[in-house]
Image: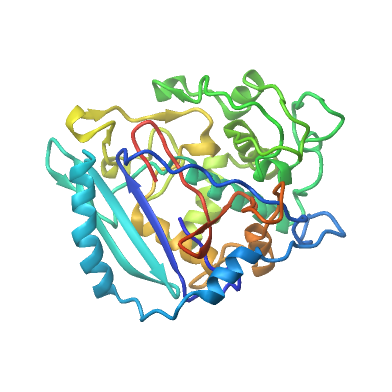
Amino acid sequence: MEMPARDRRLNVVALALFAHLLAALPAIPAWGQAAASPKTAGAAKGRTAAPAKQAGEAAKSAAPSAPEMTSADLDAFFDGFVPMQIQRDDIAGAVLVVVKDGKVVYGKGFGYADLEKKKPVSVDDTLFRPGSVSKLFTCTVVMQLVEQGKLDLDRDVNDYLDFKIRPKYGQPVTLRRIMTHTAGFEEVVRDLFISDAKKLKPLRQYLIENQPERMYAPGTVPAYSNYAMALAGYLVEHVSGEKFEDYVTSHIYKPLGMVHSAFDQPLPAEIAPLMSNGYGAASDGSKSFEVVQAVPAGSMATSGTDMARFMIAHLQEGRYGEAQMLEPETARLMHARAFAPDPKMPAMALAFFEETRNGHYMIGHGGDTQYFHS
């Protein structure tokens, strides 16, 4: 998912792609430094936002003016490009959505959701597993509770928990550090995926039994952590008193009209038949439904059309139609540079990764399961 340019004008493009095993992911860009984000409800006092990344601004100012992008342009380009890509890379199916100025300007499914039955992908109601893109939803509901003063980005998470993160380095794990992947946890994959939804443990039990070592002092070294993001989801559950999956449904899916999305495993009966099969490669045949134990870190299923609504809400500083998912100040805080080792390099925002590609500044997040890529 790609996000707006630094000046936040909403005349830019956001794009989401979910596919069955695309080619190898590009290397994750290095992170750059910035001061902490500006104050919002629940955030620490006295912090200021870092200036915009000079390289991105320079590239933007130097870029030549471009003609207006139209749906017809996108049709012509993607209809020629994507079928070639999925055939070449042995992909069963994909969905592509582009939004601009608060509207969907392109959306289409390619290939098959069920290759054996020749069931085509639908942009509206075929479900894909976006993997770690789920983390953006988790952190969005965290920020809703920050707005309400029920969570603080810079408070020790142990103050909220009914179990303890083991002390180390004399510094606390905080939500700001979790969302910038600087809590210091070692990344572990044990029990991240399990074979059967009947074996799915309650989130609290999983977090207690699988707490990893903290390899780095908090706030010093970026180290990706599925565990930490699952912990953030549990904080939402514990503080709100509502099961994490239900909380996201009530506070994101329903307000935005995302009727084909869920974190639940197995999927709710009304949308389960819409789930695309997963494929390691199209020629290898379909695989069984994946079960993600670290639910808030990556268990979501969604459609292209539903994801467009979430993209538009973030592009419009928390608003979609009449729904206000986040207050504008909170959305700006979530999108602002929050951590990096050097100011000249891309940074982490709160859950979003900064990147500059072809002269365009972006924030976004990718994701993978065993059989899906986004």
Q: Residue at the spot x=18%, y=44% of the render? A: 87
Q: Residue at the spot x=65%, y=55% of the render? A: 144
Left or right of 342, for residue 55 = left
From the top left corner, tell me how far across and down residue 198 is, in percent: 42, 21
Q: Between 168 and 197, which is closer to the camera in this rendering?
A: 168
The answer to which quarter of the image holds residue 204 is top right
The answer to which quarter of the image holds residue 55 is bottom right
Q: Between 304 and 363, which is closer to the camera in this rendering?
A: 363
From the top left corner, tell me how far across and down residue 238 is, in percent: 68, 38
Q: Between 24 and 201, which is closer to the camera in this rendering?
A: 24
Is residue 75 shown above or below 128? Answer: below
Question: Can residue 26 be seen from the camera position used here?
Answer: yes
Is residue 287 shown above or below 99? Answer: above
The answer to which quarter of the image holds residue 59 is bottom right
Q: Between 308 and 83, which is closer to the camera in this rendering?
A: 83
From the top left corner, tell me how far across and down residue 294 is, in percent: 53, 31
Is residue 66 shown above or below 246? Answer: below
From the top left corner, tell me how far across and down residue 5 is, in percent: 55, 68
**Quarter of the picture holding the N terminus:** bottom left
Q: Residue at the spot x=51%, y=73% of the render? A: 322
